[in-house]
Amino acid sequence: MNRISGRELEYLQKVLSTEFRSSMGSVMTTRLEKAFADYFGCRYAISHINGTATMHSLLEAKGIGIGDEVIVPPLTMSSTSFAVLQANATPVFADIDPDTFLIDPKSIESRVTEKTKAIITVSLYGLSPDMDKIMEIANAHKLFVIEDNAECLGGSYKGRKVGTLGHAASYSFQSSKHITSGEGGMVITNDLELAENVRRVSSLGYAGVGAEKGKITRKDIQDPDYSRHVMMGWNYRMPELCAAVTLAQLENMKDLVEARKKSAELFKEVIKNCNWLIPQKVENGYENTYWTFAVRLDHPRVDWNTFRDEFQKNGGDGIYAAWKLTYLEPMFVNRRLSGREALISKKNLEMYKPGLCPVAEKVQPKLLQFKTNYWNYDKCTEQAIILEKTIVKLDDIPQK
C-alpha cells in the first residue's frame, strides 16, 4: 500500500476549484469534523492547525491560567508541556510506570495540590495509560482531563475507544502520525460549553462560530454594529487544504493503522526470546496502535549507541531515541520560558532538575523506538531479519 492512496488529490482539487472564495465556507473542514466525531461516537470535533494548539485551546477554554497547575508526563514530546506554559499555567511532572512507559496514576495522585486544575495524559507510542484509575483521581479532586492522543489513533481501552475516556481529547495530523496532512490537529468532546469555548479560543473569539460552526459568514459581519469578538482567541483554524487531505486519510485510517500494527507484531515475534529487549507492556484489554515500536534495552554490556550502531551497520533503518525528559531540557533547566518563569512559584521552578521523576530518568536513556510506518511489508520483513541478526551478534559480546 501507499501512504497517500485514497482521495487526497480529488479533495484537494475540489478545494482549489473554489479559489478559496469565502462564500464557499469551510466545506472540507466541516466534513472532516463530522466524520471524526462520528468515528468516535462523540458530539463535537473542532479542527486546529496542529496538535499543540488543540491542548492550548482546551486549557484556555476551561479558564486554566496563572497560578494553576497541570499534571503532565515528562516522557513525551515537550509540546504537551508547552501548551500548559502557553496558557500561563504551571506544568507539574508525574513519573511513569517502568513497564508501560506511561504516566503512573500513583505518581499523579502524589502531585495533586490545591492549585491543580487539570491532568494531561499521553497515549505514548500508541498505548493508553490506565484511564479508569486516572479518572477516579480526577473525579475525586474535580480535575479536568485531556487525553493527548497524538500517537494513538484507533486504539482501545477495556472495550472503549481511546479518546472517549477523559473530558476531551487531542489528536495530531503532523507528518509522522497515523493519518496526516503534514500538519493539523483535532479536539473531540461531548461537552457543549467546552466545545463552544474551544471553537472561539481557536477562532479569534468570534461570536459567530460555535461547537459545530467553524467559520463566520458574510451575513454575520455585514453590519456596522456587529460585535465580532466575545472573548480573547487565537487563530488556530485548520486550512481547507489540510482538511481535505486529512479527510481522505481518515477514510483510509483502518489500513494505515493496521500497517503499523502489522510491523510491530513482526518485531515482537523477533524479540520474543530476547531477554534484554523489553517491549512496552500492553495489558489485557488494551489495544496499542504502535505509532512506533518501543523497547527498553536492558543488556548488561550493550548501551544505546552500541545497539544503534550495530543495527545500522547490518542495514537497519535509523532507530529513534526517546525525547529527553521535558523538565531536563535547557529551557526548563535555565528558566528560559519566555517570561512564564515569572508566573511559576519558586518551589515548582526548583523542582525542574534531576531526581524529580526517577523512574522516567532511568527508563528514558534505554528506550529504542523502531519505525512502524512501513507501507511495503517486504521492507518491514527485511528490517525484522536485520534486527534478529543484530540480536545474535550482540548476544555474543563477551563479559568484560
Image: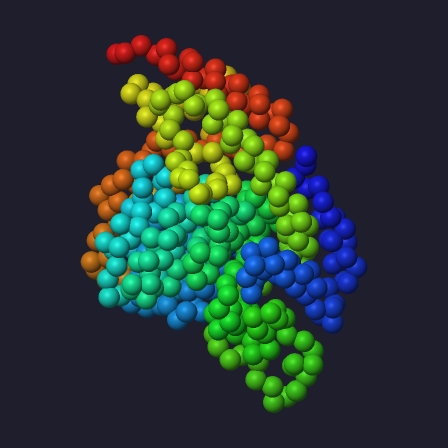
Residue that appears at 44% across and 48% down: 158
Foreground residue, 338 or 171? 171
Residue that appears at 41% across and 20% down: 273
Q: Is residue 59 visible?
A: yes
Q: Quadrant of residue 378?
A: top right
Colouring scheme, one of rainbow, by chain, secondary structure, one colour: rainbow
Q: Is residue 302 left or right of residue 271?
A: left
**Picture coordinates of residue 237, whole percent (x, y):** 58, 63
Q: Is residue 84 visible?
A: no
Numbered-mark total: 0
Which quadrant of the figure contains the N terminus? top right
Residue that appears at 36% across and 40% down: 101
Q: Is residue 351 left or right of residue 26?
A: left
**Picture coordinates of residue 166, whole percent (x, y):** 43, 58
Foreground residue, 344 or 93? 93
Foreground residue, 261 or 200? 261
- Above or below residue 314? Residue 143 is below
Residue that appears at 56% across and 36% down: 260
Q: Is residue 35 left or right of residue 141?
A: right
- Above or below residue 204? Residue 313 is above
